[in-house]
Structure formats: C-alpha cells, structure tokens
Image (tube, rainbow, N blue to C red):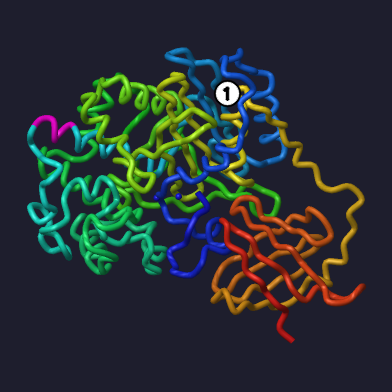
Amino acid sequence: MAPSSKTCTNSPPILQSYLKSPIMKTYSIMFGLLLALPLVSQAQQSFNKLKMDSLFTVLEEKNKVMGAVALYQGDQLVYNRAIGYQSIKDGQKTKATTSTKFRVGSISKTFTAVMVMQLVEQKKLTLETPLAKFFPQFENASSITVEHLLTQRSGLKSFTTDPAYSLYLNQPKTQAQMLEIMLAQKSSFAPGTKYEYSNTNYVLLGYIVEKVTKQSYAEVLKKNIVDKLGLRNTYYGGKINSAQQEASSFRFINDQWTEVPETDMSIPHGAGAVVSTTQDLARFIQALFQHKLVSEASLAKMTSMKDNYGMALTPLPLGPYTGYGHGGVIDGFSAMMSYYPTQKVTMVSTFNGVNTNANDVLVGILSIAFNFPYKVPTYAAPKNLKLDLAKYEGTFSSQQFPLKIVVRKEGEKLVAQATGQGTIDLEARSESEFVFEPAGIVMEFNKSAAGAAYDQFTLKQGGGKFTFTKEQ
C-alpha cells in the first residue's frame, strides 16, 4: 500500500523495502528529484519516441523492469509500450502487452476518494460525518471525520505496520476479521493534528462506501466510475488469472525473474484492491480533472494539499510544472498515475517487476516526455573490476541501527542479509561501493589498512546514513 518501501516492522527501512514491502503506499516522494531538472525551453518540443524506446529497450534487455507505460498529450496517446513477461508458468513465458492488467496498489485510494466525494455531492455523506456513525468501536471515532480519513489525518495507525501483517496477507479475511485486526492498533495522534499515511483509513472508507450505498465496493466502482467512463479493464481484483491477461508480479532473484506470492484482495479493499491497465488509468485521471466524475469544487478539495497530501492525490512537481497523481505498490507490482493539467500531459506506468530504483525509471520517463536533458542509462558493469570478495565478508553492527547485517560471498557475488530478513544481491560499482538498486541501498566499504579486509561500511538509503563496523 508502497517510494522506498517499508516493511511491517518498526525498524529503519534497511534492506526491507525489497523483501517485505507493505501492500500499498504512495510514490509522491520520488518526484522530489525532478525539482532539480532544468528545462530545455519553455516551448513544448516534439516527443522523442526514439529516446523513449531506447530507455525501455535497455530496461528490458538488462532485466531492470517489466510492465507497461502509456503517455498522453491531451487525449492523444503518444506512447504505449509493454516489456517483459505477464506470467511465467512451468517454464512457459507469456509476454506482457499493452492490454495486460496489473494490480495498481494505492492508486486504488484515488478511486475510493472519488466514490466518497460522489456520495458527498449526492448528500448521502458529508466530510464532517464522524467515523462513529459507522464504526463507533474505534479509538477517537467520534472525533475522526470522513475528511480526516481522506486526508490521512485520522491518527489511526496503518494495519500494515503490524509485524503480524506478513503472516496473514495471503489469507482471505472477512470485514469482521479486518476490523478486529485494525482495532488492535492504537492511534498515533489526536485526529486532525498530524499527517500519517495509513492504509487503515482507506479500508474504512471502502467499508463506508458499502454501508452508505448498500452495495459492494466492486459494484459501486463499476457503476459510478467504470461504466460511466466506458473503462473495459478496471475492477476489484481477485486471485490472479493469467488466462484473463492478468499479470503476476516478480522480483529478480539469482539472475532470474521469480514470482512473488499474491496478497489476498479481501485485505486491501478500498486501499489497494483495484486492477487496471495503463490506458484505463489514464482515462480515469483525465476524466477526474475534466470534472466528469466529481464537480470542480470537489476536485479543488481533493487537490488542496496539506503536508503534501490532498485526498488520495499528491503534488508532482516537475521544474516549473505541477502535476497530480498517486502511486502504489502491492506485492511485486508498482504503479504510478500522474497528470499535468496545464500541459495536459498524462503518464501512467504499471510495473510487475522492478530490479532497479523505480524512482530513476520514472524520472527518466518524465524527463523524456518533457524534453528535459536525460542520458539513457546503459547499466553496464564496471570494466576490469576484479575484486577479492572474501575481504568484504563478516558480521557488521551499528549503534545507529537495531539489526546486524551479515555480508558474505556466494559464488561470484556478494550478498547481504539483515537479521531476520532474506538475502539481497549486491552489485559492485567500484572497489568500495556496492548497491542494491531496487531499494536504493548504497554500501560504501572502508578498510583500516592497505591490503586488509574491509572492516567498516556506511549504509545509505532514503536519506539515512548508518555506520556499520565488523564484529571481531
């Protein structure tokens, strides 16, 4: 429910984002890098399809990304491409196409917010309606409003932060069971006083939609959005069905794409259960900003930002431009839906496999789309780099970090493993620098004497820096 990912633990997100990412979270932070990109000129230049093709070709050839992307100028589709595989079953690989359907994680929240605002416009609900009207058993329920839930300011802690989450995410849950799970989490703060991203908020909003309409979330989604816009490939997901062109998700492990177990879709509900395609998502966000789903006044509320979050929309700054959208991760899927209203540019990506920093890929796509300076990466390994990997091995600990990290040689590669987590493969960038791109992890090794083994490294991830020393 997933920019650099967190796990379901409360420890810092080292090595965690790749191994145990929660099912849904926003990607808004990733676009902070775009602020530094200079504009070539104020005039819009012609779209460089050849350069975009070059980017996606290298991403596919180097096994960095699998999935699809769609780019629109106004209502015109100017780029639409899929790379990699939709499914891999018994050695049989099915290529992804531009019609492949993907789980879109927290982009589901934008659908939920639209459905709620429609009910507000129909006067079946108000933004001031207290949670207590529907679920009085929650802490602070009489003070938590629908608006607090929409804007992630309720104080209700996300159920995905509970360590137990990883133990049941593949199991079907009833609404009663989910309520019991969410009720077990204590509130983090008084309603309205702070912002904290929480999947609990949007699961509850999905349940409220059902209570008010006396219909299932899937039925309201179909009637109020899908049928209204003529979307053909958007719906509440179930068990992944490859025969219906639904993609499985993957992680690149031991030099091959390995399927990721799927979350049971009874769990994410209004926070992350939608399945869609790039073109359907593009039509959805375009229609939203064209006031075909909610009024101009409602959209203004949705795009009114506090702590860089509105109502299931986040600001996406791009040089002097400002876009809006939302992203999400569920299992091995990651998706981004973005719209720049002044320029009328829409970009949607739906990935079912990421073996690099997803932020860098999205920066590349939008840089090319807006004709910013951008060099397509080659992902070429450093030439003539011969390393004695045994010198990096050891158990390392840090006073700044609660987990120990074991570094060891496996065959011709170096791997790292934090306490209680799986291993990740480290890629050498130089004699002292190793990276794990999918989680944005950089490990810079140092040694105390020339020719000696490396006895210290600095771990960098998501703006954090932690110094680890080898235990004797």
Against 11, is 110 above or below? above
Other residues around mark 1 within 10 Å, as few (<14) / some (14–19) / many (≥20): many
**Element type where label 1 sits in the image:** loop
* Magenta stretch: helix, strand or loop mostly: helix
| 25 falls in the magenta region | no
Residue bounds of the magenta highlight: 118-122
Residue 225 position by quadrant? top left
Q: Position of residue 126 (x, y in %)?
A: 11, 40
Res 122 visible: yes
Left or right: residue 349 compared with residue 154: right
- Count of numbered marks: 1
Please say if 376 is above or below 15.
above
> What residue is rendered at 10% in x and 60% in y?
136
- Give left or right: position of 378 versus 330: right
Image quarter for residue 246? top left
- Residue 42 vs 106, above or below: the answer is above
Q: Position of residue 293 (x, y in %)?
A: 24, 25
Which residue is the site of mark 1? 370
| Front one among 428 and 191 | 191
In-front residue for pair 30/34: 34
Please report the residue visible at 54 percent of the width from the left and 59 percent of the height from the top: 19
Amino acid at pointer 1: Phe
Left or right, residue 228 beside residue 258: left
Query: In the image, is residue 150 above or below residue 190?
Result: above
- Could you say where residue 193 lies in the image, as x and y percent from the top left? 26, 58
The picture places residue 379, in percent across and down from the top left corner, at: 75, 41
